Image: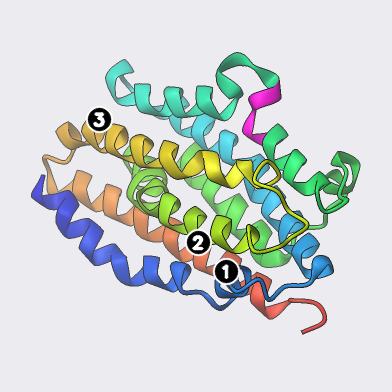
Amino acid sequence: MEFFKDLEAELREGIDKILNHAFIKRIDDAWLNKDQLKYFIEQYSVYCRYFPRFLSAAAANIPDDKTRMPIVENLWEEHGEGVLAKSHRILYNNFAAALGLSVEDLNKVKPLATTQICCENLINLCHDGHFLESLGALGPGTEFFTNEEYSIIERGLKKYDFLSDEDVYFWTVHISLDEDHYSEMIEAIVPWANTLENRYLIKSGAKKAIDLEVLFWDGLEDNLPGR
């Protein structure tokens, strides 16, 4: 649908701020030392733990099964399709463990103010906002470019000789999955993009999500230890 093509083009400036962000470039260049990598892993663990809550909150507000289905499928995959060991939180914990961070360590992480603002605003949007705004945030504002973003991060992490392909599998598994998530989500949203009001809600959610993610990465860059 033309609306989504135009929206994707409109969002590209904000998306490029993320994909070309100084902190993501540090990961891509394998510039971060081990302590700085731990700092990144700790802060991203906060977002990672929130993500299924975003999906759950959005799903609860969607009024019909057809529109809800892509969110439910995404949530099911996030939980390892019923196999706890394949849950994306477990995969992330395995990644953290490769840097010596335990689950207990992650549980004690104090989020940066920017990390907290990003996550709390997204959960509030998904929980309290219009369901089309949350679908805009999770679809065009997130899944649309996650495979690009994670490909860059995976590429950088694989440059560290102390990280194996298995260690970074959390990032690898999302690269193909999130492209499918986006196309399925757009297919479900298309019938709703039939009024100016609905299109505004979708676009608003997408822009808010991208702005909040830029804030997240800005916080990591601005507070990077030992720089």
Q: Secondary structure at mark 3?
A: helix
Marks 3 & 1, CB-CB < 8 Å contact: no
Residue 170 horizontal/vertical position (percent):
62, 42
Q: Height in image: 219 above or below 119? A: below
From the image, tell me which residue sits under label 1: 28
The residues bearing labels 1 and 2 have C-alpha atoms spaced at a distance of 6 Å
Q: Is residue 131 left or right of residue 103?
A: left
Q: Tell me which label, 3 or 1, sits earlier in the chain.
A: 1
Q: Which class describes the residues within 10 Å of circle 2: few (<14), some (14-19), or many (20+)? A: many
> Does residue 157 show up magenta in the picture?
no
Q: Height in image: 159 above or below 146? A: below
Q: How is the image coloured?
A: rainbow
Q: Is residue 209 left or right of residue 220?
A: left
From the image, give the main secondary structure of the stretch colored magenta: helix
Quadrant in which residue 206 is drawn:
bottom left
Which of 174 and 137 lies nearest the eye of the viewer?
A: 174
Q: Amino acid at mark 1?
A: Asp
The residues bearing labels 2 and 3 have C-alpha atoms spaced at a distance of 28 Å
From the image, tell me which residue sits under label 2: 152
Marks 1 & 2, CB-CB < 8 Å contact: yes
Q: Quadrant of the N terminus?
A: top left
At x 84%, y 67%, the residue is: 35
Q: Quadrant of the C terminus?
A: bottom right
Q: Which residues are magenta?
A: 85-89
